[in-house]
Image (cartoon, rainbow, N blue to C red):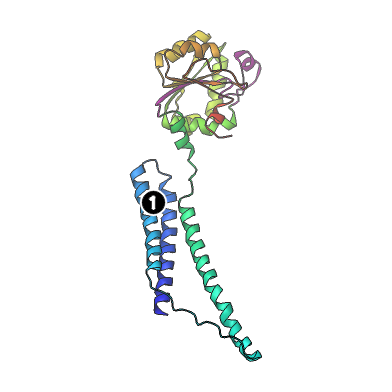
Amino acid sequence: MATETSKDELLQLIKRFSAYLTVKMSNLFSFNTLDSRSVGAFAGLAVAIVFTWRLLRSNSGPRRRQPKPQAPTTSSSVVTTQPNAVSVPSMGVCSSSEDLGVQNVVDEFFQPVKPTLAQIVRQKLSEGRKVTCRLFEVVLEESSPEELQVVSQATVRSSVLEVLLEITRFCDLYLMERVLDDESEQKILAALENAGVFTSGGLVKDKVLFCSTETGRSSFVRQLEPDWHIDTNPEVLFQLARFIKYQLHVSPTRIERTAANVFSSPSLEQFFGCI
């Protein structure tokens, strides 16, 4: 009886400790500084605890054999032996329940953790530290300088805002666009400011560049020498493919890759898995 009590206490201790490790591991996975050796150490500790418990169970000694039920001689003897016959399989059910509980704790401990947006941005950008990006159809709802001229104000796409702010926290971001007049420039700057890009993120107004031609945008990119350039114009991307390490072609229609270092996506947020 004392042995069974000790085993129960050990089982409960292991379950509580495994649950504690599960919570700690979930918290630790949210930090970018956790390396693979730390994860391996925690995982090895959890596996060692489970196998130690298994070993203690197997070495706890043979169980006392249950007395064989005697052949029934009278109706009263049948009644008295029935409870003994039922109690034997109940021990196996209890043991199976305990094993299932331990397995559930282990499964919960090793379940995959969903990466954060910051981790996705770092991974997708391959640790790139400088990014250039055009505005029309990527950050803004408007698709051309002509369209911007006929609207009262520019509009920042709400679905891309979270990704854009995360990029500004991690990378040196430059936004650029071709415009037709100074009024269009002010519309774009006002839209970005109202969306909180200059206050919540690491972007400043001096890093929003304007030009009058598509060639001017290409010249901006070549001078800045970014790790990534994001654009919607395939001709611009083709011209820059020799000079820029990675490029993203944002296009609603699927197209063939013009170069090995040019990726494509219907939108910036979809490229980072936000939709």
Location of mark 1 (residue): 43
Q: Give the magenta range.
A: 127-155
Residue 123 in sight here: yes
Image quarter where the C terminus lies is top right
Q: Is residue 214 above or below residue 260?
A: above
Q: Is residue 263 left or right of residue 141?
A: left
Name the residue nearer the viewer: 97 or 171. Answer: 97
Snapshot quadrant of residue 31 = top left
Name the residue nearer the viewer: 113 or 169. Answer: 113
Residue 201 in sight here: no
Number of marks in the rendered image:
1
Q: Return the x and y of residue 193 as percentages of the image width and height.
A: 52, 28
Q: Return the x and y of residue 271 as percentages of the image width and height.
A: 54, 29
Magenta stretch mostly in which secondary structure? loop
- At a point 52% along the width and 82% down the height, the residue shown is 68
Identify the secondary structure beneath mark 1. Answer: helix
Q: Is residue 145 above or below residue 6?
A: above
User: Is the residue marked by circle 1 packed among few (<14), some (14-19), or many (20+) residues within 10 Å?
Assistant: some
Residue 147 within the segment the image draws in magenta = yes
Q: Amino acid at mark 1?
A: Ala
- At a point 59% along the width and 31% down the height, the residue shown is 158
